[in-house]
Amino acid sequence: MNEAGRTKTPFLFGLDFELSEGFFIENPLQQSEILFDMDGTGNVTETTEGNPFAFVSFPENYRRYARRFSHVMEGLRYGNSFLTNLTIKTPVETGLSLKEIFLRSRAKYRLYVPGRFVCFSPERFVRIDKGRVFSHPMKGTIDASVENAEETILNDYKEKAEHCTIVDLIRNDISRIATRVKVSRFRYIDRVETNEGAILQVSSEIEGTLPGDYLENLGTLFFELLPAGSVSGAPKEATVAIIREAEQEPRGFYTGVAGYFDGTGLDSCVLIRYIEQTEGGFYFRSGGGITVNSECEKEYAEAVRKIYLPFT
């Protein structure tokens, strides 16, 4: 990444959550194996018709989730974490292939790796452009059909505390690589359309000024920000340890990051809203942030609510 930044060579990259696997493709617009669309820029030339489709999920039972939730709450009460992102792995069945899901998806960021996964993420990780860095952490979800949904989510004490924690964490992360860091937009609403109706998500914008030689150190600066705070928690090191114990298996590329550098600027996303392909079938990965004020039933319902396809 550093060398490509120095020579202004375009590239596509992806990194898993554990930072144990990744891919790096120079001049990715010239290949068509890994398909991507990063906020309107990508190598997608195909389209597919919007025919009827089946999509059925089989979430883990509440009792199993509650045991893992209890482990997370223990870490929170001991003060080892202020916010922990807990995720679930849900078997799903559909007549669509991963590629068909990719082509039909409507999302700000899309990525398809054949035989591995498809991702239709609404969440930017960081954008680097003209000496500035921007991040848009997303934390807080509600069904748009709920009466006064926007007012409800913005006034919810637990949701506001969770969002403030993640904004503080990302602001601190950005401060490690940039100066003049500020929160330029706080708790604004994004609307996401799904096959089961719309949901509202709460985001903020944080920005800062990069050093003059940032292109020559693109990878070095980027890796300083990993893992993504919105899908790990705070403080990171202790929280990731809690996540490992609660989830009992690696996340892989789920909640990792991916991005595209066009030779001058870089845009990247968090790999959420994610379906992976295994020998046992398809699995949808979803989750949410847990704080000491969280209620197990509501957190379980949110993780299940996030199992969707972004088209009708």
Image: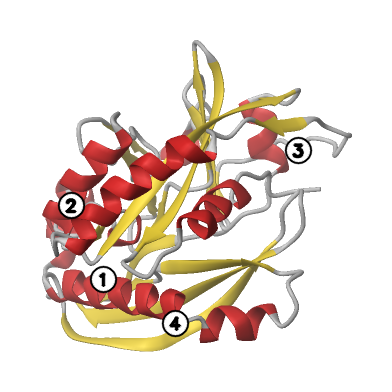
Number of the label disc, if any, that sits on residue 145: none
Q: Is residue 94 visible?
A: yes
Image depth: mark 2 or mark 4 in front: 4
Label 1, secondary structure: give it.
helix
Q: Is residue 196 left or right of residue 82?
A: right
From mark 3 to mark 2, how far is it between C-alphas? 33 Å
Q: Quadrant of residue 221?
A: bottom left
Name the residue tied to disc 1: 170
Label 4, secondary structure: give it.
helix
Label 3, secondary structure: give it.
loop
Query: Which one is in front, 44 or 98?
Result: 98
Number of the label disc, if any, that sits on residue 47: 3
Name the residue tied to disc 2: 219
The amino acid on which the numbered mark 3 sits, given as a three-letter code, is Thr
Label 2, secondary structure: give it.
helix
From mark 3 to mark 1, how far is it between C-alphas? 36 Å
The amino acid on which the numbered mark 4 sits, given as a three-letter code, is Tyr
Tell me the residue at 49%/56% (across/down). Answer: 299
Q: Earlier in the sequence, mark 3 or mark 2?
A: 3
Q: Earlier in the sequence, mark 4 or mark 3?
A: 3
From mark 2 to mark 1, how far is it between C-alphas? 18 Å
The amino acid on which the numbered mark 1 sits, given as a three-letter code, is Ile
From mark 4 to mark 3, how far is it between C-alphas? 43 Å
From mark 4 to mark 1, how far is it between C-alphas? 20 Å
From mark 2 to mark 4, how far is it between C-alphas? 37 Å
Tell me the residue at 13%/70% (across/down). Answer: 177
Image depth: mark 3 or mark 1 in front: 1
Residue 62 position (above or below residue 193): above
Q: Are marks 4 and 3 in contact (CB under 8 Å)?
A: no
